[in-house]
Image (cartoon, helix red, strand yellow):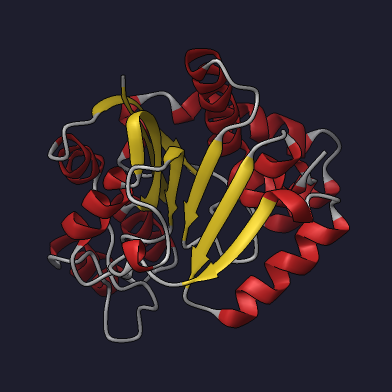
Amino acid sequence: MSDPLRPRASLRTAVVWDVLKDALERRVKAAGRDALDVLDTGGGTGNFAVPVARLGHHVTVVDPSPNALFALERRAAEAGVADRVRAVQGDAHGLFDVVERGGHDVVLCHGVLEYVDDPAEGIRNAVDALRPAGTLSLLAAGLGGAVLARALAGHFTEAHQALTDPSGRWGEGDPMPRRFTADQLTELVSGTGLQVGAVHGVRVFADLVPGVLVDTEPGAMDALLKLEAAAAEQPAFHSVATQLHVLAERD
């Protein structure tokens, strides 16, 4: 039906999409409206915004990249949801220069905290964009997954550097400015007054399995997706996930 369900893309998005879709359904029932107002901060080209719009919701995407927003608009048009997707240029720190404070049922904050100067402020702004009853979907890079990946690649010094670095970076060449543990993310969210409902590990195995195996072995893709879904809910695997997803609500 949508980008998150394409075979290759699904390895990266399936867990988050399933959790988010269920959260949207609950929020629809709680709000008593079929169409929600959703804010996607840092939503880029619409990996989640377009599928959410296809469910009938109105989505505002805030992103600093004009090129990404142009691609989003084209993608929304091709999906037939251009009337339900609004592209706005901006960033997390200046969020309320471009969107309404307290005007959204659901806020997606995916791949944002890694890049902002002050993650706590970034989270506060995302939460302040919510209505009195609302849902936050937070997705950020996980520390443990990076450490594991560097170690398995034989880069043991870089793995140790990531493990001990305050920002979770393995060196100057690391393209990721910051990584988090599950405890760090839940603490940031709880500090805003929201109730953390669930934490999921994302891409626990997908980034470690050779692509040729997934592409050539019959049934491997489906089996890996099922494994990812099962492991995502187990706290023991949060410490080795490439990404961490936190779902929080204010009722």
Q: Is residue 132 left or right of residue 15?
A: left
Image quadrant holding the N terminus, namely: top right
- Quarter of the image holding residue 165? bottom left
Query: Which quadrant would the C terminus be assigned to in this image?
Result: top left
Locate residue 169, reporting x and y percent: 26, 71
Q: Position of residue 16 (x, y in %)?
A: 53, 38
Residue 114 in view in this figure: no
Q: Is residue 151 above or below residue 247?
A: below
Q: Nearer the viewer, residue 59 or 228?
A: 59
Say which of 117 and 70 sits in front.
Answer: 70
Return the residue nearer the eye: 22 or 221. 22
Residue 200 in picture, x, y percent from top left: 41, 33
Q: Left or right: 118 with respect to 234?
A: left
Question: Which residue occupies 60% across, 29% down?
Answer: 21
Q: Is residue 214 left or right of residue 46?
A: right
Q: Residue at x 75, y 52 (%)?
A: 83
| Residue pictured at 73% horizontal, 66% vertical | 73
Image quadrant assignment for residue 234: top left
Q: Is residue 27 above or below residue 71?
A: above
The x and y percentages for residue 233 are: 43, 24
| Res. 35 visible in picture | yes
Which residue occupies the foreground of this view, 115 or 34? 34
